[in-house]
């Protein structure tokens, strides 16, 4: 696989085929996270624990893998705000710390690796709670842009939300720089939110298939997520997929999982994936040709498989939100139309191997490459 191919299209499938499988447990967690957030596009993550040592944040209790916080993401504000939220949690053990990353630009200036990446189309609300062992638990909630103000006023103090700037960049800086102490534990917060849901059970998230998640459903998933018990909607033989990844490669495991979901979610042979704004999908053609790419320029980290399941990591945020390339000069040829059915297909990656180009439309028309 050439770098030109791998550098453009994590947007297509949202996994890195070149990463090593660290262990069965970590790979199973990653596949579950991929199923929940990329394939099913669910709004709440499972809880993930962070471990502090010598001023560093680790994502494993053996202190071997540091939390990846990209300094180029949002001008460093994501990194700064996450560190501030973790420190606040440690100083206020047992209390929920709220940290919000709004929709909007991934970077504030040109010249970063994110120049061609579309803005985040939804917000991510993080809940952090530290315990007496200086471990910090966190889960993430996806917040639809159209529901944002009502959601934030339910979680945060009203004046904190009303004082936020209107300018998109300044708004992002405001929320990322100012995590808030809820001054109550997770159980009290859930009880408080349940009370709100009885009066007004409003929407929080709409996924890529138009499935809406109301406050009461999000509360239920928060309860499950805080115990690590949110499970995918279909059963997957993870031992089989782990063995497949070890013996043949990570891509084979992911595509087998995608193939298991395809009959459930496909329409006209295409299965839309989360974090795509309607752009990323898997077709019968893709499953047959086995075209697997990665957004390698962004996601070169040794512990990618663990980071993608970690709510506070830059990788989780980017996987969960859109990784579509901006319209225009996006590294692809122009989109093209099937002459038989009129369906529009994405242009091929400029400079890519012709053998990887689409050969057939879902209607059966053969393309001449």
Image: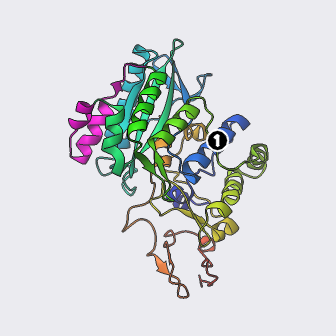
Q: Residue at x 62, y 79 (%)?
A: 360
Q: Nearer the viewer, residue 12 or 203?
A: 203
Residue bearing mark 1: 231
Q: Please identify the quadrant where the N terminus is shown.
A: bottom right
Q: Which residues are magenta?
A: 158-184
Position of 268 relative to 44 (above/below)? below
- Give coordinates of residue 337: x percent, y percent: 49, 82
Task: Tell whether position 180 is magenta.
Answer: yes
Q: Please tell me whether mark 1 sits on a helix, a strand or a loop.
A: loop
Task: Tell whether position 141 is magenta.
Answer: no
* Residue 149 location, quadrant: top left
Mark 1 crowdedness (10 Å alpha carbons): few <14, some 14-19, many ≥20: some
- Give coordinates of residue 38: x percent, y percent: 55, 51
On screen, residue 141 versus residue 225, left or right, reads: left
* Residue 335 location, quadrant: bottom left
- Give coordinates of residue 59: x percent, y percent: 56, 28
Q: Is residue 217 visible?
A: yes
Q: Residue furthest top?
A: 132
């Amino acid at each position: 696989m050439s770098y030109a191919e791998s550098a453009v299209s994590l947007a297509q499938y949202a996994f890195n085929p070149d990463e090593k499988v660290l262990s069965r447990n970590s790979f199973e967690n990653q596949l579950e996270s991929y199923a929940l957030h990329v394939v099913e596009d669910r709004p709440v993550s499972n809880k993930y624990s962070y471990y502090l040592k010598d001023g560093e944040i680790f994502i494993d209790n053996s202190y071997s893998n540091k939390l990846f916080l990209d300094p180029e993401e949002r001008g460093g504000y994501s990194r700064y705000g996450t560190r501030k939220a973790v420190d606040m949690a440690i100083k206020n053990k047992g209390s929920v710390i709220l940290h919000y990353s709004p929709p909007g630009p991934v970077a504030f200036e040109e010249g970063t690796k994110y120049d061609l990446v579309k803005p985040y189309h939804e917000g991510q609300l993080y809940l952090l709670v530290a315990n007496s062992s200086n471990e910090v638990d966190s889960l993430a909630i996806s917040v639809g842009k159209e529901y944002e103000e009502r959601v934030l006023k339910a979680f945060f103090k009203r004046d904190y939300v009303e004082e936020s700037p209107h300018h998109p960049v300044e708004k992002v800086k405001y929320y990322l720089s100012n995590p808030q102490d809820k001054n109550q534990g997770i159980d009290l917060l859930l009880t408080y939110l349940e009370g709100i849901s009885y009066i007004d059970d409003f929407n929080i998230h709409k996924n890529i298939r138009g499935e809406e998640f109301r406050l009461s459903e999000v509360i239920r998933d928060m309860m499950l997520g805080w115990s690590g018990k949110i499970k995918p909607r279909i059963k997957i033989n993870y031992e089989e997929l782990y063995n497949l990844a070890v013996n043949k490669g990570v891509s084979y495991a992911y595509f087998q999982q995608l193939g298991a979901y395809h009959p459930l979610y496909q329409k006209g042979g295409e299965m839309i994936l989360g974090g795509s704004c309607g752009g990323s999908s898997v077709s019968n053609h893709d499953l047959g040709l086995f075209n697997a790419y990665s957004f390698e320029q962004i996601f070169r980290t040794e512990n990618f498989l663990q980071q993608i399941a970690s709510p506070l990591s830059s990788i989780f945020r980017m996987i969960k939100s859109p990784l579509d390339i901006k319209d225009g000069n996006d590294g692809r040829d122009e989109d093209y139309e099937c002459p038989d059915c009129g369906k529009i297909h994405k242009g091929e990656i400029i400079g890519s191997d012709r053998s990887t180009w689409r050969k057939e439309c879902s209607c059966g028309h053969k393309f001449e490459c």
